[in-house]
Amino acid sequence: MCGIVGYVGKRRLVPVVLEGLKRLEYRGYDSAGIVYLQDGKLVKFRSEGKLQNLEHIMADAMGAPAHIGLGHTRWATHGAPTTANAHPHSDCTGDLVVVHNGIIENYHSLRKELIEKGHSFASETDTEVLAHLIEEYLDGDLRAAVTQALSRIEGSYAIGVLWTGMPDTLIAARNHSPLVIGVHEEDGGFLASDIPPLLPYTEQIVFLDDQELVVLQANNHTVYSLVTGEVVEKKIETISWNAGMAEKGGYKHFMLKEIYEQPQAIINTVSGRINPENGSVDLPEMNLSDADIAGIERIFLIACGTSWHAALVAKYWIERWAGIPVEVDIASEFRYRTLLIDERVLTVSISQSGETADTLAGIRLAKQLGSKIVTICNVVGSTMTREADGTIYTHAGPEIGVASTKAFTSQLAALFLFTLFLAEKRGSMEAAKRLEFGKELIRLAAVIEKILPALQDEIKELIESYYDSRDFLFVGRGLNFPIAMEGALKLKEISYIHAEGYASGELKHGPIALIDKDMPILALAPQDAVYQKSISNIEEIKARQGRLILIGTEGDQHLKSITDDIIYLPKVLEELNPILYTIPAQLLSYEIASRRGCDVDQPRNLAKSVTVE
Ligand code: M6R
């Protein structure tokens, strides 16, 4: 999705904004632009494609004596990803510029109206109407004009506005699209769609809420409600992330770095939440009373993509150990079906970013129907955490690679804790077992840490026979069925190989027709409760000459009679296999994509944070 960076302060503008845009690259984009104010005039640069194109045309502007400006990475929605459609967009005078994330749904009628009033348009974008609309209302008071213009907009937006008439001020606003402010006494004021651009300068963050506008100056920021026009007192939050967390740290790709960060991310997510003496689980930010928990009759888990796979695993855990029926929905489907939800239902959203539009819409709907909302989220202060009744934070640190890795395994760790928490409160699991499970979760992090380097080497070699495949199947049973789907999603999104994940037992109902000597099938076959059943399904694949890669338990000699391509993993608590078995699936996708020369961290057509519906 698009990214915004803005700055006003003592530093030279171009390096701050350019570096900030680089830190938003993970969001996905196809053109970019920067504007700054110098000698009373706006200077604008825009280009198609990656930021290096923009950097190239700005080579002579790096040291420009400018201290206020805006930058934008555009992920095309309305109009092709051309230079003319890249932001910033100007009004007719060229004295006012706008950058925008989101979609202006009524832009057709606004554009028509503005053209009739004499405005001329230079792009096909929805955003440009906003520049002309503000121009239309501007009569010396920029805040009033922006407020008036936004009152005409239907849709979602995060915007930044710069006008030569107020050379020391940026105006920004949001509605259903994230925007954060960074403040620093010396350095000035920062504006961004996400936290990483702010990390080199400040840990002091103000999270704008929907329908809020900020007037941002180097040493001052004032937030107003777009509804009442009144000043809103905002809390400045201190975040614990640092700049290094959003850098590659010697790894070839963010995705690889993030795969290696998983043991620490799991430990951070679990730390301090489970009492080592009695196995009691403490999730204070969840904000649910004992009575709330006792009253839960059903749980809805809603999420998208990889986070949805985490929900599918959690269903097995919660139903088995807490005895509460669980329904799992893809958020974009949840929203449009008949929902039998009331106050006896707990709705849990799972989202790395906390900004995914469909998931957000889902929790809003569930809330209206009377459900309490808990969110499992990685980003402190994100919209979802602010709208939910309570949050269980995953402490994975910033995830930059578009392919979700450490956020996923941390979500699983958080959901496992959530299961133990519910089981404790509902009295469905003995303390000793909770303690054992908690310890096994910590041990798992150490196991993953130990096996990672050798596992990567092994997989790197293995993929030489598979990296140019056209299709791939992933299969698993029980707790590992969602991991088969996750493996397939990972492979398809970063390598562009067509991949599907199936429950092993489902193969014979259709997909088995695809199997021949050219079809690679990765089968998850740990020695668990459904091991024998998995082996029978794997034999069915072998009988049809499928090219099997098996992932199984160390010491399982039987697997050797099936195929030579086996990845052995240590035995861990069966319940935790989904976390462990995810690791080789991630590495396989990573190594294949890397071998094929794909843009691993920013795969085509994808965005890290999907803030449109
Ligand atoms: O931020 P969220 O967890 O809500 O994002 C949901 C999906 O967009 C995300 O998991 C997506 O599927 C990833 N690219 C998968 O790697």
Image (spheres, grey):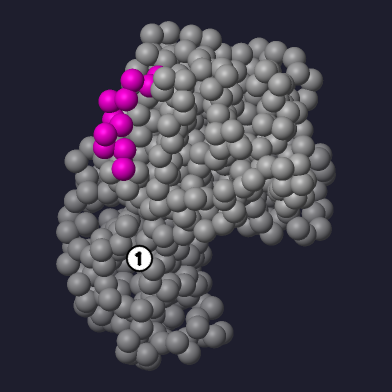
Place of residue 337 in the rendered image (x, y in percent of width and height, measured from the top left): 77, 59
Judge by depth and name the residue closer to the eye, 607 or 515: 607
Residue drawn at point x = 40 percent, y = 39 percent:
45
Residue drawn at point x = 37 percent, y = 13 percent:
10
Which residue corresponds to mark 1?
495
For badge 1, the amino acid type reads Ser
Kindly give the residue lying farthest to the front in the view shown: 118
Residue drawn at point x = 55 percent, y = 34 percent:
94
Place of residue 475 in the rendered image (x, y in percent of width and height, measured from the top left): 44, 72
Residue density around tag 1, few if under 14, some if 14–19, many if 20 or more, within 10 Å:
many
Residue 230 shows in this picture: yes
Asked which secondary structure carries label 1, the reply is helix
In the figure, is residue 58 to the left or right of 229?
left
Judge by depth and name the residue closer to the eye, 330 or 595: 595
Residue drawn at point x = 38 percent, y = 65 percent:
491
In the figure, is residue 582 to the left or right of 299?
left
Place of residue 53 in the rendered image (x, y in percent of width and height, measured from the top left): 32, 48
Place of residue 497 in the rendered image (x, y in percent of width and height, measured from the top left): 38, 72
Quarter of the figure with residue 200: top left
Q: State yes or no: residue 215 in magenta.
A: no
Q: Is residue 59 above or below residue 588?
A: above
Stretch of the chain drawn in magenta: 57-68
In the figure, is residue 350 to the left or right of 457?
right
Q: Is mark 1 within 8 Å of ligand 1?
A: no
Judge by depth and name the residue closer to the eye, 556 or 368: 368
